[in-house]
Image: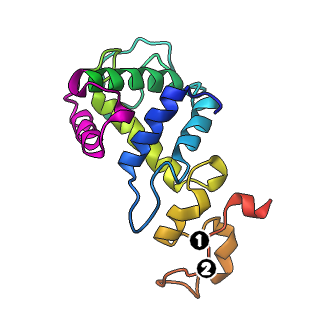
Amino acid sequence: WLTLSPAEVAFFTAAMDTIIPADELSPSGSDCGLAVFVDRQLAGAYGNGARLYRSGPFLPAKPQLGWQLPLSPREFFRAGIQEANAWTVKTYGKEFDRLTDAQREETFKTFEAGKADFQGGFTSAFFFGQLLELAMEGFFADPMYGGNRDKVAWKMIGFPGLPASYREEIRTYYDKRYDKGPLSIADFS
């Protein structure tokens, strides 16, 4: 692991499996490599807040105005995991990764509704929204970034992968399912 502690790995693994459970369409989020994707993202420029303005003042703002925190994404997720675990310990007597599937789902519904009291200048709804966004990004990202292992998400939706790889076949497959395997950036290296 590049940046996540063992407790953070356990949280992200459980969170990604709750957001993307294994079913007949795909493996679970952790089996798709989403915890690895998150670790790599938080270890790099994104995690360090390289493109974020974090000098304040930070006034209450509409959600559509985006990130309004002095924290980098890495610091934000570390604080969010601590808040989430504190809430689940208070509510269920154990940390998030030790909850049952039903308890995890109920916890995320509570977070999404903003009903869990988080300290640190952000709401549980904002934390859940950022977590959900990372899960979607990792699930559909090019596999070279750690998520979408074996291109399972691309195969599930019929995405051909790297656009330049099927340019000549666009007319052949227009309004039809693309039945060839997807290609990632790594397939051209």
Q: Which mark is residue 170?
A: none
Q: Which residue was labeled with disc 2?
A: 180
**Res 126 quadrant in image:** top left
Magenta region, residue range: 90-116
Q: CA distance from mark 1 to mark 2?
A: 7 Å
Of helix, strand and loop, which one carries label 2? loop
Q: Where does residue 25 sit, x and y in percent of width and height?
A: 42, 67
**Res 66 quadrant in image:** top left
- The reply to whether callout 1 and callout 2 are in contact (CB within 8 Å) is yes
Asked if residue 16 is among those painted magenta in the image, a careful observer would answer no
Q: Nearer the viewer, residue 65 or 176?
A: 176
Q: Which mark is residue 160?
A: 1
Residue in the image at 28% along x and 32% along y: 125
Q: In the rendered image, is residue 10 in sight?
A: yes
Q: For the residue marked with disc 1, what is the amino acid? A: Pro
Q: Main secondary structure of the magenta part?
A: helix
Q: For the residue marked with disc 2, what is the amino acid? A: Lys
Asked if residue 111 is among those painted magenta in the image, a careful observer would answer yes
